[in-house]
Image (spheres, grey):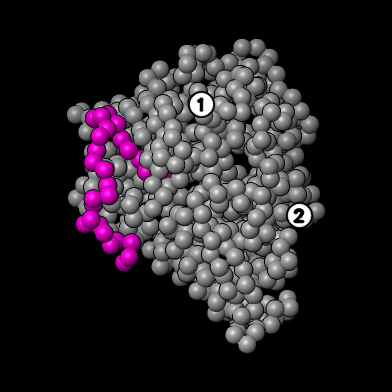
Amino acid sequence: MLALIGFGILAGCRGRVEGPGSVVMILESSPNNLDLRIGADAQSERVGGLIFDALVKKDEHYELQPWLAKSWEQPDPLTWVFHLRDGVRFHDGRPLEAEDVAYTIRSLIDGSLVTAKGGGFGAVDNVEAKDRLTVVVHLKRPDAGLLFNVSDGLFGVVPRGSGRDFGLHPVGSGPFRFVSAVQDKEVVVARNHEYWAGLPVAPAGAQDIERVRFEVVPDAITSALELKKGSADLASNVVTLDMVHALESAPNLKVESGVGSPVVYVTFNVTDPLLKDKRVRQAIACAMDRQAIVNAIWRGQARLANTLLPAGHWAAANDAELAQYPHDVARAQRLLEEAGFPAGKDGVRLRLTMKTSTDETTRLMVTVLQQQLRAAGVRLEIRSAEFGTFYADVTKGAFQMYALRWIGSNEDPDIFRYAYASSSFPPKGGNRGRYSNARVDELLTEAAASSDRSARRADYVEVQKILSDELPGIPLWYPNNEVIHTRRVGGVVPRGTGSFDFLREGWVR
């Protein structure tokens, strides 16, 4: 495989210069913003999740458990009351109190920040610090998704008064404190020895991870080389599965694999003249052979997805309830014909452009997709850019199609509001394809206002049925979490969310 060429040529990789309690972890791109009120990309949420604490924390089944909030209650549908732990301090020594939580939530909705995450708090009317450790959130309308929106990865409590540039020098209360960052190069964090939740206990002969340098390496082959040489210690879902397979035989490396909740998806710009007809979008779905891509690129280490929610989620529709698009080139051609795209003399019916980041697995995926669509008469041009440029383009709607993955936010059915509600166009949400459907909006509002889980499920299933027919986007598959690490590092247990929480308990020999 081309991906493996050069494994013996290590001149481009640096030798280790880190201290004995330090590890180097590879990121494929820089975090967009380490302030979790703003940063919505995977790197921001994963690194930020080590610096900050949320009010509640997801367990392995994505159920919400106490964290900064030791308990909470809803005295009525429009009121949430959170009781905070005492003795929690920010990294600068200030106590974390109710006013900090109230400020964090207010800053998401009062216009002081430009953030897509504000939409998750759109139902909030006001927030008050009832006393030093009690936060009361008053809603304008019932919102059953509020608790998820104050969970780890998505939310982090900041000190009161933190402004727009807070992400440049973030101060949290999490297990690691921010040390430094250089855009497109690295982020450095160090162990918070005063962490309220305690410190891990390393086995005999080992020590806790004291310092993590997140090194930005956009190229997957370079990442594999650094791991093989030992100049990097960890990489989570960074290198291709071909490379993972090759690296498994390296004596100094170990691969940890587990089922993941993130979902890879394609989004269409439904306002584009060529894509506004759902039959065109359905044709593209039929032209795809998703299982072939999983077999070729993911080596079978992924499961096909028909919805954004993780498999087995209580609100997920089952396959029998959703429109299906098995690989069928003839059906794809027929749909394009019906939509007014006959084949030209060269067999081409339609020319489209797909934008992606420079992530190696994504680039391989869209290259295969390009070949598959050609059989149906669709010529797909691929435009790759570093993540910051790519993300800016898709946020402002400068695309016809793009590929990305939902990480974390798809563990709650509120993902459908964030991704598809008419009120969620950027910067108020993640509806980057500008999809709008009045019935979907009505169902999402109804589901958010209900405390009856069975009624909410019925609403969400109907939303998923509509989305599977209109296809503003195509859920593709759920990749397994693949964490590669050197054998000097231990205690690495991948989370289903794909978070970096294993660094909390990890140790180094």
Q: Which residue is mark 2?
A: 436
Q: Which circle, 1 or 2, is nearer the viewer?
A: 1
Q: Let me know if residue 23 is in the magenta part.
A: yes
Residue 167, percent across and down?
54, 30
Task: Tell me the residue at 47%/58% (across/down).
Answer: 362
**What is the quadrant of the C terminus in the image?**
top left
Report the predominant secondary structure element of the magenta stretch. loop
The circle drawn on residue 170 is 1
In the image, the segment drawn in magenta is 1-27
Task: Tell me the residue at 27%/38% (across/down).
Answer: 489
Query: Upstream in the sequence, badge 1 or badge 2?
Result: 1
Amino acid type at circle 2 is Ser
Q: Residues within 10 Å of mark 2 (few under 14, many from 20)?
A: some
Amino acid type at circle 1 is Pro
Q: Is residue 439 left or right of residue 415?
A: right
Q: Secondary structure at mark 1?
A: loop
Residue 180, percent across and down?
42, 29
Instruction: State the CA–CA distance, disc 1 to disc 2.
Output: 36 Å
Residue 313, percent across and down?
57, 49
In depth, the one of 373 and 125 nearer the eye is 373
Q: Residues within 10 Å of mark 1 (few under 14, many from 20)?
A: many
Q: Is residue 298 left or right of residue 42?
A: left
Q: Is residue 447 left or right of residue 39?
A: right
Task: Tell me the residue at 73%/66% (across/down).
Answer: 273
The answer to whether any part of residue 353 appears in the image is yes
Task: Tell me the residue at 55%/79% (across/down).
Answer: 375
The circle drawn on residue 10 is none
Residue 498, percent across and down?
45, 44
In depth, the one of 298 and 146 nearer the eye is 298
